[in-house]
Amino acid sequence: MNKKSHKKKNKKKGKNDGRNKENVIEAEKEVEESVPEDTPKKELCYEIKHSDVMGRYVVATREIKPGEVIMSEPALAVGPCAGCGLICLGCYRELDESSLVKCAGCKWPLCSSTCHGLGKYTGHSTYECQALKAVPPDYSNLEDLKDSYHALMPLRCLLLKTADGAKWAVISTMESHNELRRARGDIWPMNQRLVVDRLKKWKMGFNEEEIHTVCGILEVNAFEVGGTGANARALYGTAFLLAHACAPTTTHTDAERARGRPLTVRAAVAHKPGDLITLCYAYTLQGTLKRREHLRLSKFFECACARCADATELGTQASALVCPRCGARVLSAAPLRRDAPWRCVATHCAYEMPVTAIQLLLQRLTEELEGIDANDVSEFEGYLVKYRNVLHPNHYLCLSALHSLSQLYGKVSEYMIHEMPESLLNRKLEICRNLMKVFDVIEPGYSRLRGITLYELHAPLMVLTTRDFERKSITKDCLRSRLKEIVGYLSESALILGFESPHSPEGLMAGAAREALKKIKTWEQIIGKIS
């Protein structure tokens, strides 16, 4: 199976509570985040099946409601992402190179001598510290130090062979795709240089094949974990079995400061008995060409999910271009074929482009979009206008620009929500509603994208409603209807984002939604009960 590496991001056993010898002794004195209780085996809502095509996968055994916890399990191993910068080995936060704190035992970098990850297997464990004592970093060569981080997560996994045999036994069952990776001219040599040769130089006692195997297990099965500023990946004993789909049926979160750093997988949509339970190993706000390329290169399989197999991407047109001849849509003639040409869908038009030209066009337009300042409203709007005759309004590059605009309008200088004219408030409303139509297809149900967009949607509607009330240009019935609509947006947003860590940006937004709901209650003194 292949796992999300998201937000790979997203990657991505339940009955193992992680209480091995070490973490009983070194257990956190205070759990700062609450997590759902692990579901007893008799109450599991899923079962693991096997097929020759999919390998092991997970299906529902009963009806599962949106928002319901499907599984919650502690990590088997947690460590730095490949290619991260200089980060704390305990909590994975980026460090200031000019003021580094060194571990008292091994001299490797930490954020502080009181880091919450010290002594824990999910952070800088005692056995890792002991192993690294023999290879203290050279702080006069920071680039080499950063390169050495590539080897730390593989090392943590390999150290489990003696530190925690039960965890190692589960990791050993995971797919590494060694033969596929060995045949590639990029991944295998890179791991040889950055991981294998490094661990051999450190004399850690592991052979080349097992080091390469662990590298493969991580590439295929690891989930990216942590909020803003974290650079960590983790392996989980059951969640890695979830099948991939580019329109996933679940969401997942990790509790950074809870014991064992558990991953909780929730149903985003309702499941019936026998339904496949899926997550997405790619970025849903990318088009089919980009998603399939990412999955092929980093997860070693060719995605043929319903979204990838449909040139219209389930009717969203998220990859559609505009025909320069007739203005109709240009789509891939066969989206599951990498070399398939792209053609105009109009029966009277014979316009066609080779996929290589499409890829070059998308590369150029992507680079231009990524070059826009993250807070520049006018540049994002200008991009949409500039390419309105090239990209379908729902093209993933347009969606990316619109997603940025949905959060910039109302929050940046010159566009603060209470200062915006009605035209821009309506523009924000239009953007959010159009995004919702697409998000409801590519990330259906209780997804982060939906929760965030619902919150953004309530703000302009609330301001417009307040202005109408102050001008006495809205009837009491219309006012009640508008407020009921706003309450619906905020309530669902608070519910969805409330699944996230309370300290994450999404968790803070959930808190803001709850506060906004309290304020709306004051309107009931004027118009009576809203709902």
Image: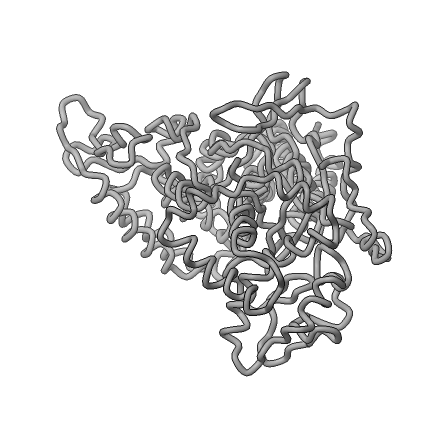
For the residue pair 174 and 252, the one nearer the viewer reads as: 174
Q: Is residue 350 above or below residue 510?
A: above
Left or right of 497: which side holds 146? left
Q: Give percent across and percent down for residue 244.
A: 51, 33
Q: Position of residue 322 (x, y in %)?
A: 24, 37
Tell which of 47 and 176 is nearer to you: 176
Asked whether the viewer can see residue 464, the reply is: no
Q: Does 39 sit above or below residue 219?
A: above
Say whether residue 116 is left or right of residue 25: left
**Relative to 35, does residue 336 appear above or below in the rendering?**
above
Color encoding of the figure: one colour
Count how many numbered circles sit on residues in the image: 0
Nearer to the camera, 332 or 165: 165
Q: Residue at x 51, y 68 (%)?
A: 147
Residue 471 screen position, x and y as percent: 56, 42
Q: What residue is shown at x 70% (from left), y 32% (from top)? A: 69
Residue 42 visible, this orientation:
yes
Is 193 or 401 nearer to us in this picture?
193
Please tell me which residue is depicted at 32% across the width and 28% down the height of the picture.
311
Residue found farthest to the bottom: 140
Left or right of 84 on screen, residue 381:
left
Q: Residue at x 64, y 62 (%)?
A: 92
Percent across and percent down for residue 57 are 57, 28
- Say which quarter of the image contains residue 175: top right
Q: Quadrant of the C terminus?
A: top right
